[in-house]
Image (cartoon, rainbow, N blue to C red):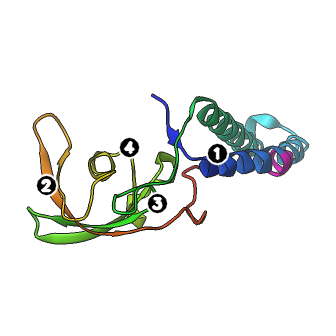
Amino acid sequence: MHNQLTKNDIKKMEEEIEYRKLVVRKEAIEAVKEARAQGDLSENFEYYAAKRDKNKNESRIRYLERMIRTAEVIEDKSAEDEVGLYNTVDLYFEEDDLVETYRLVTTVRGNTLNGSVSIESPIGKAILGKKVGDRVYVSISETAGYYVVIRRIEKTQDDGTDKLRGF
C-alpha cells in the first residue's frame, strides 16, 4: 500500500532528510568518535548511546526516503462544498450526542491528540468528499461502526505547521 502524500509533504520530508544528513549525521558521528576515545568499549555507556542515536537517525533517513519513493502523490484541492484535505470539520456523533472537530491530514501528519485525523483512517475515508448535512457511516470493522453527521466544513489550506510524525 502506498502512502498518500501531497507535494508539500514530500518537500518537508526532503528537507528533514537533508537536515539529518548534513547536521544530525555529522553530530552523531562526532559523538561516537568522542565516546570511543574514552577507552574500554565494553562498559562505555556513552559509546552505546551515541551508536544508538546514530543508528536511529540513519533509520529515520531510510524510512523517509522509502516513504517518498513509494508515495502516491495526491492533490490537496477539493470542491468548495465538500470535505477535503486540510479542512476542519465539525462532526455530530449520534450515539454519543456529541459534536467534535477534526482536521483531515495526510498519514504522516495524523495526530488524533491534536484533532488531526488521517484521510486513510476509517473516519477520514468516510467523510472525505462528503457535504454539510450528510449522514455518514464510519465502519471500524466488518461488524461494527457508527454514524456521524457533518455539521460544518471550514476550508483551510496546508499552512505547513503540522509536524511530520517521526522519532
Q: Are marks 3 and 1 in contact (CB under 8 Å)?
A: no
Q: Is residue 42 above or below residue 12?
A: above
Q: CA distance from mark 2 to mark 1?
A: 34 Å
Q: Look at mark 3 in the image and give the residue it sits on.
A: 86
Which SS class for mark 3? Answer: loop
Q: CA distance from mark 2 to mark 3?
A: 22 Å
- Is disc 4 surrounded by few (<14), some (14 to 19) or many (20+) residues within 10 Å? some
Q: Is residue 157 above or below residue 26?
A: below
Q: Look at mark 4 in the image and give the residue it sits on.
A: 120
Q: Are marks 4 and 2 in contact (CB under 8 Å)?
A: no
Which SS class for mark 4? Answer: loop
* Magenta stretch contains residue 72: no
Q: Amino acid at mark 1?
A: Ile
Determine which of the numbered discs, if any, sits on residue 10 in the image. 1
Q: CA distance from mark 3 to mark 1?
A: 16 Å
Q: Which residues are magenta?
A: 22-28
Q: Amino acid at mark 4?
A: Glu
Residue at screen point 70% across, 43% down: 57
Q: Amino acid at mark 3?
A: Tyr
Q: Position of residue 158 (x, y in %)?
A: 55, 62
- Among the two numbered marks 1 and 4 on one chain, the one whose residue lies closer to the N terminus: 1
Q: Position of residue 114 (x, y in %)?
A: 42, 66
Q: Look at mark 2 in the image and give the residue it sits on.
A: 147
- Among the two numbered marks 3 and 4 on one chain, the one whose residue lies closer to the N terminus: 3
Q: Position of residue 4 (x, y in %)?
A: 49, 40
